[in-house]
Amino acid sequence: MKKLHLIFTVLFATLFSSVFAQEPSVMLSDKPGWHKIGEVKADFKMENQSISVLGKDKFQSILLKVTDAPINIEGIQVFDESGGMEEYDVKNELKPGSETRKIDLKGGAQEIKKITFTYKTLANQNDKKAHVELYGLK
């Protein structure tokens, strides 16, 4: 039964991803530790990016890692499965190879439906776009 549920979840994620540019992340592991939830390429204007999470989506903390180019992360919104939303101010200028502080989710571990973050890619000499990875701690 669990296998069938997982197959339908993956199928739904595949169909869902063909409709939206951002591919949802399907979490299959419940092991403790940090897990990569998803990733996006940033643009050269103010943007909001979302990463949807399906499957084993219960996390207690999150953080963003940046490569390729500098970026200014303004804030993060975490949407949970029950319909609630929490906002976290980040206001952090990140250089390639750096990461935000660990952001502990309010109320402890939550089942995350989607995470949205607001950013601005900073000018750089090679006009590279920042690559942003989202991690969650189980």
Image: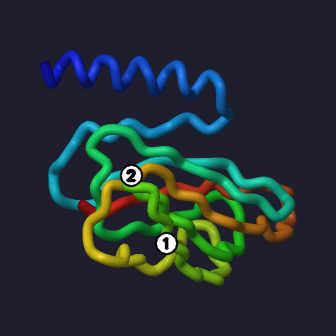
Q: CA distance from mark 2 to mark 1?
A: 12 Å
Residue 75 higher or lower than 31, as above or below: below
The amino acid type of the residue labelled 1 equals Glu
In the picture provided, is 125 more to the left or to the right than 31? right
Residue 24 higher or lower than 77, as above or below: above
Look at 53% across and 78% down and name the residue there.
Answer: 88
Colour treatment of the image: rainbow
Q: Position of residue 130 (x, y in %)?
A: 69, 58
Q: Position of residue 30 (x, y in %)?
A: 18, 48
Look at 71% across and 74% down and name the residue there.
Answer: 72
The amino acid type of the residue labelled 2 equals Glu
Residue assigned mark 2:
81
Q: Nearer the viewer, residue 60 or 122?
A: 60
Residue 38 higher or lower than 93, as above or below: above
Residue assigned mark 1:
86
Q: Position of residue 108 (x, y in %)?
A: 26, 73
Q: Quadrant of residue 45?
A: bottom right
Assign the C terminus to one quadrant of the image.
Answer: bottom left
